Amino acid sequence: MSKSNKNLTQPLYDTLLQRIMQGEFSAGDRISENKIAAQFSVSRTVVHTALLRLEQDGLLKMIPRSSPQIATYSADAIKDIGTIRVAIDSLAVKLAMLYGSQADFLELEKFAKECQHGMQMHDEYLQHTADSKFHLHIAKISQSNLLFQFQNDLYLRVNFILLTHHDAIQNRSVHVQDHFDLIQAMLQRDERRAQEIITRHLVSFYNLEETYPPHFFSRYSSPDF
């Protein structure tokens, strides 16, 4: 790809990503590459490259000899993501408590309050964005660049799922309160309690109790795992 095309691809990708994450497209919608090219006055090559990046993000499906389609996630696919999140979020909390300072943990309150405000204002976009920032900040405190990058990439899918599955969070007030409880456990350096909260938080969110046998995730609730 030429340098000029590369320079055009990033802003187009950013624009399409924003439109998807703000709900302008519904799961399963078809996207016309020709219409996008005409709308933004760019080549089909630029459009195709931007759409390929969105496919890598898990937000789009490229279909041979057909129009690209906004991603759809089955219940099983969502539970797969939830299973992975229990493991990596638990590790992020464990590492954060090893390397993080009290000031690091207190900074989490800003995102917890934003998430709470989004819930109170019935602003799902604000709530989901703040929720992502909360968990990503824990990954940042962990001082594992690879873990942070993995979480960051995964959260595009997580937020898209929240956007397209409005009933994903069954009890929003409990979900939001978990953030504050987790902060307190981390401030008190109570790793066992912190692991219990993050595990319950995610197992409940993804309804994993119905998928795995009792105590399947119990090792993540122990500081000795």
Image: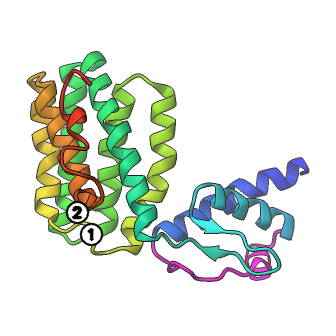
Q: Position of residue 82 (x, y in %)?
A: 36, 53
Name the amino acid type tagged 1: Asp
Secondary structure beneath label 1 = loop
Return the mark for residue 90: none
Prevailing SS of the magenta stretch? loop
Q: Looking at the image, how many numbered discs can be counted on the residues?
A: 2
| Viewer-proximal residue among 113 and 169 | 169
Specify the quadrant of the image occupied by residue 31.
bottom right
* Residue appearing at x 48%, y 66% in the figure: 21
Extreme-front residue of the structure: 213
- Spatial distance from mark 1 to mark 2, Cα to Cα? 5 Å
Q: Which comes before the other along the chain, label 1 or label 2?
A: 2
Residue 179: quarter of image: top left
Residue 35 sits inside the magenta stretch: yes
Q: Which residue is mark 2?
A: 118
Over which residues does the magenta segment extend? 23-43
Nearer the observer, 214 or 188: 214
Q: Amino acid at mark 2?
A: Gly
Q: Position of residue 197 (x, y in %)?
A: 15, 41
The residue pinned by badge 1 equals 123
- 146 relative position to 92: left or right: right
* CB contact under 8 Å: marks 1 and 2: yes
Residue 99: % across, % down? 30, 17
Q: Nearer the viewer, residue 84 or 58?
A: 84
Q: Residues within 10 Å of mark 1 (few under 14, many from 20)?
A: few
Quadrant of the drawing holding the C terminus = top left
Residue 124 percent coordinates (x, y): 29, 68
168 left or right, relative to 196: right
